[in-house]
Image (cartoon, rainbow, N blue to C red):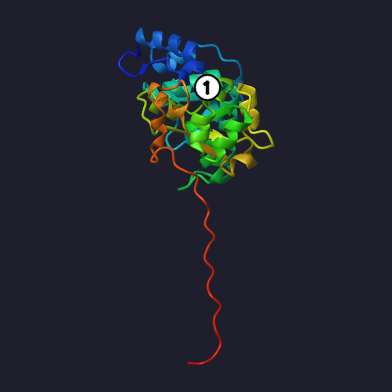
Amino acid sequence: MNPVAGGPAVDASPPWLAALAPCAQRVAARTAAGDSVAHALSAEPVAIELPAGPLRFVPGDSAAPGEAYEAFIFRTACVPTRDNLHDLLNGLAWLHFPRAKRRLNELQAAEIARTGIGGTRGPLRDALTLFDENGAVLDAPPALWEALVARDWRQLFVTRRSLWREARLLVFGHALLEKLHTPRKAATAHVLLPSGANPSLPITDASIAAALDAGHLATKPFVPLPVLGVPGWWSPNENFSFYDDSEVFRPRRVQQPKPTKPALQGGSA
């Protein structure tokens, strides 16, 4: 466990943080030495620029009063960052997946410019926020995808368990990573189901960014996945009774047809 001075802590060892671990360890070392989270993140190299210039992390109160968070990032290339675990993990995602995060920000900013900030975000901004906060990407054999989409948890995690050796799951959402800091069985990712015949998505920054199509995202193409059921991710799931919990591993809802009203009969009373 790497302490952050006066604030959050980062444990970079769990499998869900594997992609971010090297950067997380360096940032944690800086914050432990007294740096703010924003300053520690800004010391890391950034692979690309945003439309407004080089990506930077700034104090959490940097945006003008009333300015939307995503609009501020798009306008300034600055990410407001508080000294807490949530914002630290968001910053790590920016550093490791800058193309995907830039794409999310561009789409959010375009929608804000088009519709403004109202009481509701609308379907596209809802989907963008859901993926940014709670999303995941899966590269897996077709049999695992079929079981996941069908919510056939026994097939997914028990019968076809050996296939997980050929699979890779990336937790992208920083809010979900924050929840997994204290692992609980119900922690659930929203796995992006790409458009096209092959649902598998190679897990690279460029491929994730390319999959973030506005029209597709507006349909909310996500499949829920209780991530602590993934083999090797949490020792309690080695006992297969782990998956018998119907409050977590819920069956897929069957859409019931709407009842039709009976035709009115003619005649008089």
Residue 42 x %, y %: 48, 14
Which residue sits furthest right? 197
Which residue sits furthest left? 6
Is the residue 34 above or below the residue 101 in the image? Answer: above
Q: Name the residue located 59 percent from the left edge and 40 percent from the top edge.
A: 217
Is the residue 42 above or below the residue 78 in the image? Answer: above
Is the residue 110 above or below the residue 53 in the image? Answer: below
- Can residue 159 be seen at all in this image of the molecule? yes
Closer to the camera in the image, 226 or 136: 226
Which residue sits furthest bottom? 268
Closer to the camera in the image, 187 or 214: 187
Q: Name the residue located 52 percent from the left edge and 66 percent from the top edge.
A: 259
Identify the amino acid type marked 1: Trp
Q: Mark 1 points at which residue?
A: 94
- Can residue 54 be seen at all in this image of the molecule? no
Residue 49 x %, y %: 60, 20
User: Which SS class for mark 1?
Assistant: helix
CA neighbours of label 1 inside 10 A, class few (<14), some (14 to 19), many (20+): many
Total marks placed:
1
Which residue sits furthest front? 159
Closer to the camera in the image, 217 or 55: 217
Is the residue 267 above or below the residue 251 in the image? Answer: below
Q: Quadrant of the N terminus?
A: top left
Residue 60 x %, y %: 41, 25
Q: Name the residue located 56 percent from the left edge and 39 percent from the top edge.
A: 149
Picture quadrant where residue 63 is located: top left
Residue 266 x %, y %: 56, 87
Picture quadrant where residue 137 is located: top right
